[in-house]
Amino acid sequence: MDGSETFNLQATLDAIGQALAAIICHVVFDAGIHGLVMASCVGLIGFVLHKRGVRYGKPLMNVFRRLSIFCGIIMIPGFAALVTTGKLPPVGVYNVNSAGFICFWSLICLHISAEEMNHFFFRNEEETIEEPASVEISETGAAKDEREVVKV
């Protein structure tokens, strides 16, 4: 280097900040939209199964709730950019590939569904405590003990 070019730290930091903001606002927003679509599919399947009385319905509805909340949170910066500027910030040569996002969210849905069903069907005995709710005395004089399970 001959010294005629000087390094401008502020311009470099500004460029990095703009790129980071664009990626967070645009790419993460697109990922959140695709996540909501996948969560809606899981939620619809869970709703149909729950209405039919299949025991897999409730865990899938829980997966829908958890994924929807997460996707809503990660979409906040992109939604704020849409509201304030009317468009998402440009990120250069970024091309949306829905197949990639759908595969990504499918793996996440599969993992969360397995964890939720595992928790739903195989709860530890330590998580429930049996406590007497009331003791009634029947007409014959014998005590009738009604117990209910209290979740801790």
Image: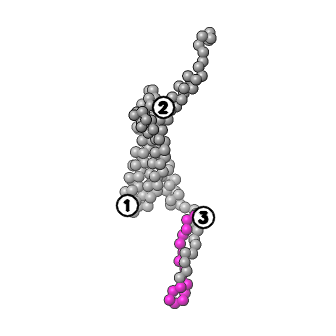
Res 51 label: 1
Residue at x 42% of width, y 37% of height: 83
Residue at horizontal 41 percent and vertical 55 percent from the top: 46
Instruction: Check the image and report above or below for 150 versus 115.
Output: below
- Asked if disc 3 and disc 2 are in contact, CB closer than 8 Å, the reply is no
Foreground: 67 or 59? 67
Q: Which range is magenta?
A: 137-152
Q: Quadrant of the C terminus?
A: bottom right
> Where on the picture, by quarter, is residue 81?
top left
Which sits earlier in the primary sequence, circle 3 or circle 2? 2
Q: Amino acid at mark 3?
A: Glu
User: Does any portion of residue 22 appear in the rendered image?
Assistant: yes
Residue located beneath label 2 in the image:
22
Q: Is residue 61 magenta?
A: no
Asked if the magenta segment contains residue 140, the reply would be yes
Q: Is residue 12 above or below residue 58?
A: above
> Which residue matches tag 3?
126
- Residue 131 appears left or right of 101: right
Left or right of 105? Residue 52 is left
For the residues bearing labels 1 and 3, Cβ distance under 8 angstroms: no
Label 1 environment density (alpha carbons within 10 Å; few <14, some 14–19, many ≥20): few
Specify which label sits upstream in the sequence, 1 or 3: 1
Q: Amino acid at mark 2?
A: Ala
